[in-house]
Amino acid sequence: MDPFTDTLQRLREAFGSGRTRPAEFRAAQLRGLGRFLRENKQLLQGALAQDLHKSVFESEVSEISISQSEIDSALRNLRAWMKDEKVSKNLATQLDSAFIRKEPFGLVLIVAPWNYPVNLTLVPLVGALAAGNCVVLKPSEVSKSTEKVLAEVLPRYLDQSCFAVVLGGPQEMGQLLEHKFDYIFFTGSPQVGKIVMAAAAKHLTPVTLELGGKNPCYVDDDCDPQTVANRVAWFRYFNTGQTCVAPDYVLCSPEMQARLLPALQSAITRFYGEDPQSSPDLGRIINHKHFQRLRDLLSCGRVAIGGQSDESERYIAPTVLVDVQETEPVMQEEIFGPILPIMNVRGLDEAIDFINRREKPLALYAFSNSNQVVKRVLAQTSSGGFCGNDGFMHMTLSSLPFGGVGTSGMGSYHGKFSFDTFSHHRACLLRRPGLEKIYAIRYPPHSPRNLRLLLLAMEARGCSCTLL
Amino acid sequence: MEREVQRVRAAFRSGRSRPLTFRRQQLKALRRMVQEREKDILAAITADLSKSELNAYSQEVISVLGEIDLMLEKLPEWAAATPARKNLLTMLDEAYIQPEPLGVVLIIGAWNYPFVLTIQPLIGAIAAGNAVIVKPSEISENTATTLAELLPQYLDQDLYAVINGGVEETTELLKHRFDHILYTGNATVGKIVMEAAAKHLTPVTLELGGKSPCYVDRDCDLDVACRRIAWGKYMNCGQTCIAPDYVLCEPALQDQIVQKMKDAVKEFYGENIKESPDYERIINLRHFKRILSLLEGQKVAFGGETDEATRYIAPTILTDVDPGSKVMQEEIFGPVLPIVPVKSAEEAVRFINEREKPLALYIFSQDNKLTKWLIDHTSSGGVTGNDVIMHFMLSSLPFGGVGSSGMGAYHGKYSFDTFSHQRPCLLKSLKREGANKLRYPPNSPSKVDWAKFFLLRRFSRGKLRLLLLTLLGVLVAVLIKAGHC
């Protein structure tokens, strides 16, 4: 039997009752989320350490603070975001009231992944709650410890008539997706993204899909190798490479590669010590399936740095691969691990061609002292987001929309973009019954004279009509 | 077909459609096409819908010209990067959102306003720098043929193509990969389009339909209300996605409404409606018969005359309509207006909310509070108060549905944005690496505290203050390194 029917019915009824509409209710939910984070910080850090061997620093920076920041922003801006947005009017509507009303969609489904199980669950949740929806949350079953906290502790902080956590694996997901939602927000792989969208199509449910891909990282000859190596290494090995916007592979000239390798080694040693396995700042692979997948990738090309692994801990050393062929597995799938292949290109043109031959990535990076080079890469490629001379810093700016394009996703969120994503923008035009004499020009019987006046009213400049 | 799609994609890859000068040139060419070939365009529309040329012009051509002019005027502004508000960590960097073309856009048009519903999306797609494949509705055959003839004569033939055909060809077309699909039509096909799009992770805009309710309050200027409703309902013989589909009002109002609408119809179309050049016909026999079947067992208060030979259906009003009857089960898309009596505004709201979210909601009332209350307690693509259709005309309002009436929106800037990828860009420099030491491992509790400070603290004013903070950050990094914190 379908375990979700009752829960969904209950939430739908709650939405129908209008409970989630008032700003006070939404603010209360957001404050509840804030309290959840503050009162359970240790618990969450512990869960993240269990699931991903995430350090306190990483938990704070990439999961807890980011989520807190979004909650604070939503609370600060809620009323401003909720306000009807007035729009400019034309001659015919001068005396009318024209505005866009932001409305909740209704019942929203948020499907979250395992790599940043707090951030990628709570940040969309902030948007959905701020926008006044009822929410069904499906955390990832892969990050088991965090899933437990989200399922058992989080609901206590929210109004449970309007919020529910549902659990399960692929089979339960399939069942869940057969139901009708008013919006689905999915973070995960493109393959599953297709399944979600196809399921949504059956109910004409709009979706935001935050997917992934292989994020290219172009390193120009004109740059300081150590600075670049610091930055690329940090963003690559953060969360053990299990980041949708991590630099996936490097594109550079053979000369640059020669300078980059020692710099990367130096950065890795400085970050994680001589024995990275004992560093508290390096995480672990989420599960055995991914560990095995990544371990197989270690045999692609040639290991220039790292390459060690330890199955008992699901540990993989920060690794750099060279002499990699485009056809090898490490260049065919999103790596999602602490392995950085370096592909050689002879110049910027070849790099841009290489990038454009492939699917549009979620993020694109270009390192160069030359602003021109950076801007050229930007102008001649497409990607979800772009950062010049650094890694995924653009994600920390909530004034920038975060989302993909092409197979890396559709739609975006963060900050106000979250609120807008989870709202229906309803066009409203409120007119008066007066001035009917003027509007009469639109009624039949039609004549060239009326048409002339109509053109005037619609400010159709320079319209030469053969009928006049 | 395969070759044509590949040709359009190759043309996009060449980068030709990106420069603003090119886009403007194409839009101007489109404008020239509409003006120079006006006669051909009007002839096609009038042949398809038995419409007068004046109507075709005012209903379709004006909107197209207006949209082109708007795009030409606003293109530099809309295509420009928008600076984004920065935080402490990015204070000295460049942060902005850059609109970019998506690639190859597929536009599937509808038959009821065959010109504007195909060309208006095309305008937005061109303005956003995309290549476009247009698939006009095969049901409005003349317009489809004319578009296939005219567009290549004025627009870049490799970037913009017209592919005609029926269900088979459309299904085949949908197997290809596009970077955005805009479909105007019904929900059933909308689902098919979205399912096909899912296979390629192609985003879609679906402009669908539904039954747009029209609530008439006792406290309203009934004369004006009825004229406006009659105008919106019988325009294009009711074949408008945002036509008021049915009326909800108190039982006592029904007779008055019928009478006043009758008067309005007479005013619009004269005594002999069939002879009026301003009254259209049903598009084809299938729809004619469909609408006819909706009349079965209904109380015809006014109208009801039909003529199969010319696919004529008179402006018709049904009263005391039973919500369970056939005419209340599907979008009418014809000149038949059912009146469903309700006891109160509350009942009207319940009635509306029991059904799928409509594309449009109409409210006639002088009571602003009531209007606001009705809007607050319902949902719909759009709303017009005290009129019908008009929210479609304001290009600063997004035009689109919600729920089964559609997803996404277009018109004006919304078209431009729909067909663009808004790409966030952060440009940093390779300098000031010292400041970054704060973020690199090995980590420490004080680093965590500083990270929180930078992430959670909001930047207020003054570049000086920020410079101070950055320097402070560097200082802290240095101090941590030296083990003093």
Image (tube, coloured by chain):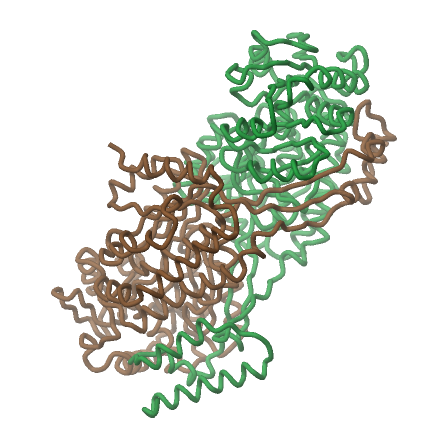
Chain colours: A brown, B green
Residue A462, relative to residue A255: is it above or below? Answer: above
**Residue A166 appears in which quarter of the rendering?**
top left
Q: In the image, residue A400 lies at what x, y percent?
A: 51, 62
* B161, above or below A449, in the image: below
Residue A297 figure quarter: bottom left
Given residues A410 and A14, the one toward you in this image is: A14
Say if residue B145 shows up in the picture.
no
Nearest the eye: B201 or A27: A27
**In this image, A274 relative to A202: left or right?**
left
Q: Quick check: A439 above or below B265? A: below
- The foreground one among B15 and A431 is A431
Task: Look at the image and tell me in which quarter the C terminus of chain A lies.
Answer: top right
**Residue A178 in view (yes/no):** yes
Q: Report x, y in % for residue A70.
A: 45, 62
Q: Quadrant of the N terminus of chain A?
A: top left
Question: Residue at horizontal 56%, vertical 37%?
Answer: B377
| Residue extending farthest right | A449
What residue is shown at x 60% (from left), y 63% (from top)?
B82
Indicate the quadrant where residue B397 lies.
Answer: top right
A267 is higher (above) or lower (below) than B370:
below
Residue occupying the point 34% across, 74% down:
A234
